[in-house]
Amino acid sequence: MKKILSPSDLTDEIAVVVGTRPGIIKFSPVIQVLQKVGHRFFIIHTGQHYSYNMDRTFFEDLDLPAPRFYNEGVSKETYHGAQTALMITGVEEALLEAKPGIVIVGGDANTNLAAAIATRKLGIKLAHMEAGLRSHDWSMPEEHNRVMIDHISELLFTPTAETRKNLEEEHVKGEIYVVGNSIVDAVIRNKEIAEAKSTILSQLFLKSRGYALLTVHREENLDNDETLEKIVGSIEAVSRHFGDLPLIFPIHPRTEKHLRHKRYYEKMASIPNLQIIPPMGYIDFLKLLRHCEIVLTDSGGIQEEACELRVPCVTLRENTERPETTAVGANMVAGTTPEHVVRAVKEMLQRPTTWENPIGDGKTSQRIVEKLIENL
């Protein structure tokens, strides 16, 4: 039995690997371009996100084909190592059966590292979409993943000249292509669909520009008791200082679990003007984001989406791997200390939303597909 596949073993199919909500969204326009040009491809789902609201509803919202391969059992694991190991095994089995010519991963989740390792070990060509992002914070699991994936990829699709520079300084071995970020393609393609189909504003009795939006899910924010306490304090402070602005909080399942375990959930639920709601599909969330006055988040993808939608963003972290958004004035990295967060919200609410998006022009997916086919 072969442990490494040779070029003669491989087909001309392209394998697209997803496993998280952001990954599904970012790959949706790439998948749609592959469908449009008629090139053979299939989807591998690693199983990292598994609930209906965090996964399947995104396939439905975005009208995407079902994965050919789905990895079972990953959701039962708590630790990075066990979760990643199961995903490596599942992706390896899928690749051995299908034998694609290229595998493309996108982003910095464990899903992408697992698929990248399986691909590399089998000798299949590996492409990394969203390559070159760096927070320069080695305590972040996502930073480890980004660096490792970039250094074992043959094709590196990077969003900007700055992210290309990061890769050049690290002397990566693969070919680097500056293509933009596909999340911009997704927003451009889907914002009017969301406008027409979603009734989320009326469901929540909200008016356009009459509320703020909050998301929190990053491991470095949830797992550190001191940081989580500061975030809860920051949300309380924002509620006090901006009492006429309701704060809508679609809660990630992992976030709710941590808040309940550390007995912060009841405190959060009692904050005036804070409305905790279940996680939602992409179309509803996109409309909610498009119409909010400001978004407070620790998500990298939401920083990018808000930039495209010209919604002021305050990042609840000490750093960002999307510095281009701060450079154009669309985003401010506030940390998690209450006074800093309040100051950032106040400043961002006063800024004009006239910036130009530096991370994409809506043609990223076309560029990526062209390069994938060219390199088969």
Image: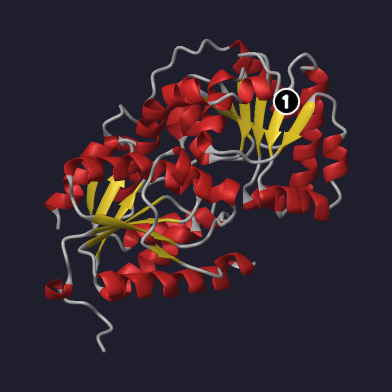
> Which amino acid type corresponds to the residue marked 1 in the rendered image?
Leu
Residue found 43% across the figure and 66% down from its top: 114
The quadrant of the rendering that contains the N terminus is bottom left
Q: Please tell me in which quadrant of the rendered image residue 357 appears.
A: top left
* Residue that numbered label 1 is attached to: 247
Please tell me which residue is depicted at 50% across the width and 52% down the height of the picture: 20
Q: Quadrant of the C terminus?
A: bottom left
Along the horizontal axis of the image, is 118 left or right of 125?
Answer: right
Does 272 appear above or below 141?
above
Position in image of residue 316 (x %, y %): 64, 36
Q: Residue 247 placed where, x, y %?
A: 72, 25
Q: From this viewpoint, which residue is outermost toward the bottom?
A: 1
Query: Can residue 178 be spotted in the picture?
Result: no
Tell me residue 324's x, y (percent). Answer: 42, 30
**Residue located at (59% from left, 46% from top):** 53
* Circle 1 residues within 10 Å: few <14, some 14–19, many ≥20: many
